[in-house]
Amino acid sequence: MISETKVVPAFLGGFICIYGLVSGFVKERLFLSEALVAMVFGILIGPEVINVVDPRTFLNVEKFTLEFARYVIAIQVMAAGITLPHRYIVRKWRTMSVLLGPVMVVMWLVTAGIIHLMFEIEFKQSLLIASCAAPTDPILANSVVKGRYAEANVPKNVRDALSAESGINDGLGLPFLYFALYLLNENYSTGHAIGKWFYWIWCYNILLSIVIGVVIG
């Protein structure tokens, strides 16, 4: 009997081998990233289409997805930092300040506004969803910062800025997320929510983490 745990590695290995043969054409001619192709392949073999593999039958999908996503993001953020030129953030602090400050806030609010209008949900809930959608994804950003096409068509300063911004704002999405969560908490008044957001998220989780990183870095 063929179990699901044997089918998954078989499909994964097959996908890697086949994609390796055509990856040049897919990336250089079709301009599609590995992440997009892998996602489409997963949807096709999943329970909603061909139904060859149904992860729900052999694992806790929610817990696995959460933990796997954490590992992937951590690795990719680390990779983004390693590939940047030495002292890039220090030398380009003005560019980073604009991208991670006003630009990200505008992206968050605009995304929340679009979600609010499209789905007719409370604006606070829209802010919560937008905090997950607004930050640039460092994995998907790879399609325009790495590879021969990117090197030939995208200026290096743009690629470096996008890599740095996508790596940093994954962490900076945290205060936007908790700002909306605290506002949605019925046990908190608006003032209490903003106060806790400031001292617990900014002072403890973010600033203290930066200090620890500087000390041990």
Image (cartoon, rainbow, N blue to C red):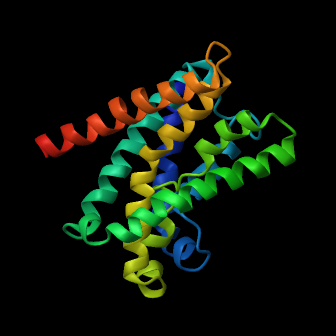
Q: Camera-side residue: 30 or 215?
A: 215
Task: Report the residue that reaches farthest toward the top.
Answer: 187
Q: Is residue 136 left or right of residue 199?
A: right
Vertical placement of residue 103 versus 157, above or below: above
Residue at horizontal 55 percent and vertical 62 percent from the top:
103
Count of numbered circles on the image: 0
* Image coordinates for residue 90, horizontal then vertical, percent: 24, 66
Residue at horizontal 44 percent and vertical 67 percent from the top:
162
**Would you identify the image quadrant in which residue 91 lies?**
bottom left
**Would you identify the image quadrant in which residue 120 lies?**
top right
Q: Is residue 106 left or right of residue 21?
A: right
Task: Report the residue that reaches farthest toward the front.
Answer: 191
Vertical placement of residue 84 versus 74, above or below: below
Question: Looking at the image, can residue 1 be seen?
Answer: no
Q: Camera-side residue: 66 or 48?
A: 66
Vertical placement of residue 83 versus 132, above or below: below
Q: Is residue 114 left or right of residue 53?
A: right
Question: Looking at the image, can residue 56 be seen?
Answer: yes
Q: Camera-side residue: 89 or 203?
A: 203
Task: Report the residue that reaches farthest toward the bottom.
Answer: 152
* Image coordinates for residue 210, horizontal then vertical, percent: 26, 42
Residue at horizontal 49 percent and vertical 38 percent from the top:
175
Q: Camera-side residue: 142 or 1?
A: 142
* Image coordinates for residue 211, horizontal then vertical, percent: 21, 40
Q: Quadrant of the N terminus?
A: top right
* Image coordinates for residue 168, horizontal then vertical, percent: 39, 53
